[in-house]
Amino acid sequence: MITSINISHVWVFDQDEALEFYVGKLGLEVSADMEFGGAMRWLTVRPKGMTDREILLEKVAPPSVDPASAEKIRDVITKGASGFAVGFVTTDAAALHAELKAKGVEVTEEPTKQFYGTDFAVRDPFGNRLRFVEPATGYVGR
Amino acid sequence: MPTSRVTAARGAPAVTSHDLTPTEARNRLMLRARDIMDRSFGRGLDTPSLGARVGMSEAHFIRTFKEVFGETPHRYLQRRRVERAMYLLRETETSVTDVCLDVGFNSLGTFSRTFKEITGISPTAFRQRHQPVRAVPTCFAMAWARPSSFGEARLASPPYSGASAAPGGAAEAKEDDA
């Protein structure tokens, strides 16, 4: 039986730039940042204090992927075709939206009231799509 | 090789990677234009003003957008508007005329013709055939409910048909950008 999700994955082009965005703009914290010599850097972030889930910020580059594939993946991400990367939960969608917008984050959908809560969407610096929801009171489906 | 930062045409500089090749920077800029269409489809958007938003002449913008996404910005905007119209026809009681105006068409004739050309059926027939769908985030619904330009749209039974229990519900996004 699978009981939870511990790691999600997002492709990034530059891990320092990813940190600047995911930590510096979104306000997540570094969960692990380990270099293993050479090109390998295990970099994960998580919502502050959340110890059982992390997001792996993996660089699109050799030797993990071959150069031609890396080029294709980057092409797809910058076209916005990388799909729905991560959905975050917030206690105040309006406040978070205002904060991110002030920080220059590219908002693609303004806060909108849905039956499941109020949510909005942004793009990360590379083109990945992220979503933030303030769940509606009593809504437990998400 | 890194290229210059892609900046938003207005407001704070957008947070965009510096680590982009010229081709990737072009993709990202066209994605920004497409995101504007996704957001502001209901307002008199046109190709020249969209081009201006990304710092390009109309002709250059159309050519570049087509290279990146395989269709003209005008066609993309039509599909976005038709997708919204499908949503409103399916989920609300709004009249066909009001749906037409709400999604950004100025003329009922153009709306009906475009809707039929893209989906294969008229707005009225679409409303009669389709049930509400709901329960997924709007970006997902928007992407998957958008009628295709690439061949699937004219299937006898499109993927979005009869999907009363399938994901897709998307509320009207509140627009504060344009």
Image: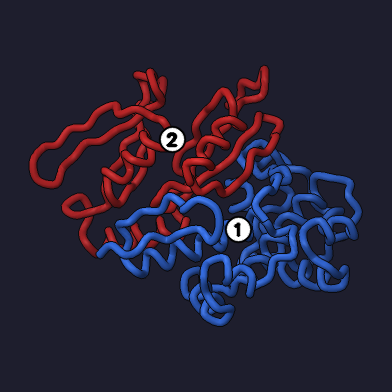
Q: Position of residue A119 (x, y in %)?
A: 61, 35
> Where, by quadrant of the figure, is residue B28 drawn?
bottom left
What color was chain B assigned in the picture?
A: blue
Is A33 displayed left or right of B48 in the figure? Answer: left
Nearest the eye: B57 or A75:
B57
Q: Amino acid at mark 1?
A: Ile
Which scheme is used to colour this image of the protein? by chain
Q: Is residue A2 visible?
A: no
Answer yes or no: are tags 2 and 1 on the same subunit: no
Mark 2 is surrounded, within 10 Å at the Cα level, by few (under 14), some (14 to 19) or many (20 or more) other residues, namely: some
Residue located farthest toward the front when viewing the structure as drawn: B11
Question: Is label 2 in contact with label 1 (beta carbons under 8 Å)?
Answer: no
Q: What residue is shown with label 1?
A: B36
Task: Identify the residue at horizontal 55%, vertical 43% (top origin).
Answer: A121
Percent from the top left, x then y, of residue A69? 27, 60
Amino acid type, residue under disc 2 in the picture? Leu
| Marks 2 and 1, how far apart at CA | 22 Å
Q: Is residue A2 above or below residue A102?
A: above
Reply above or below: A49 against B79: above
Q: Is residue A101 visible?
A: yes
Q: Of helix, strand and loop, which one carries label 2?
A: loop
Quarter of the figure with the C terminus of chain B: bottom right
Residue at horizontal 49 percent and vertical 32 percent from the top: A88
Q: Which residue is mark 2?
A: A26
Placement of the N terminus of chain B among the 4 image quadrants: bottom left
Label 1 environment density (alpha carbons within 10 Å; few <14, some 14–19, many ≥20): many
Q: Position of residue A123 (x, y in %)?
A: 48, 48
Which of the 4 quarters of the picture holds residue A67? Answer: bottom left
Instruction: Determine the residue positioned at 83% across, 61% down.
Output: B100
Report which colour depicts chain A: red
Q: Is residue B82 left or right of residue B75?
A: right
